Image: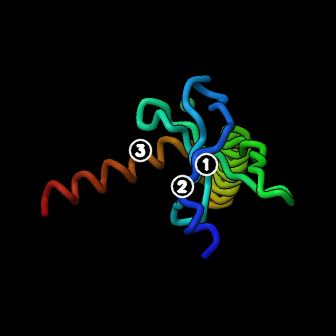
Amino acid sequence: MENVKRAGEQTEIVCPKCGEGHLIVRIGKAGSFVGCSKFPTCTFTSNFTRAEDGAIVLQAAEEPTLLDEKMSAMWQNRYAVLVGVLACLFHALGIQNASTFIGQLQNSHAHYAAEN
Ligand SMILES: [Zn+2]
């Protein structure tokens, strides 16, 4: 309830993104956060914690790009593993040219789709 009462509170913190607006306490689905008073011109937002005296302390911004890089590296690894497994499977089945086989599969599927 405390956070709800404080919604709309304008802080003395100057927006670090645009340097013009001040940060305002807002309530979102995930809880309270601060956003720029220049919104929607400036879309800066940040999570925050409160110091003992109630002062707002901005939390370090998360780094989604870093997470994205991790995610894409993970998927690249998985794709590489998948391709490796398929290559082994094709080899075990005696199919030497896997890409040709995949092409034939796609062609036969296309024929099937066209006929039905
Ligand atoms: Zn701003």
Q: Is residue 87 visible?
A: no
Q: Amino acid at mark 2?
A: Arg
The answer to which image quadrant residue 14 occupies is top right
Could you classify mark 1 by the number of other residues whose Cα lies within 10 Å: few (under 14), some (14-19), or many (20 or more)?
many
Q: Residue at x 30, y 56 (%)?
A: 109
**Foreground pick, 43 / 98:** 43
Q: Amino acid at mark 1?
A: Val
* Distance CA(mark 1)–CA(mark 3): 53 Å
Looking at the image, which residue sits at the far right?
A: 52
Contact? badges 2 and 1 (CB < 8 Å): yes
Mark found first going from the N terminus, 2 or 1: 2
Quickly name the residue at label 3.
103
Q: Residue at x 61, y 54 (%)?
A: 33
* Distance CA(mark 2)–CA(mark 3): 54 Å
Q: What is the number of the mark on residue 34? A: 1
Q: Quadrant of the N terminus?
A: bottom right
- Residue 53 placement, left or right of 99: right
Could you classify mark 3 by the number of other residues whose Cα lies within 10 Å: few (under 14), some (14-19), or many (20 or more)?
few
Q: Is residue 107 visible?
A: yes
Quickly name the residue at label 2.
26
**Residue 36 x, y percent position in the rendering:** 54, 38
**Residue 105 x, y percent position in the rendering:** 39, 53
Mark found first going from the N terminus, 1 or 3: 1
* Distance CA(mark 2)–CA(mark 1): 6 Å
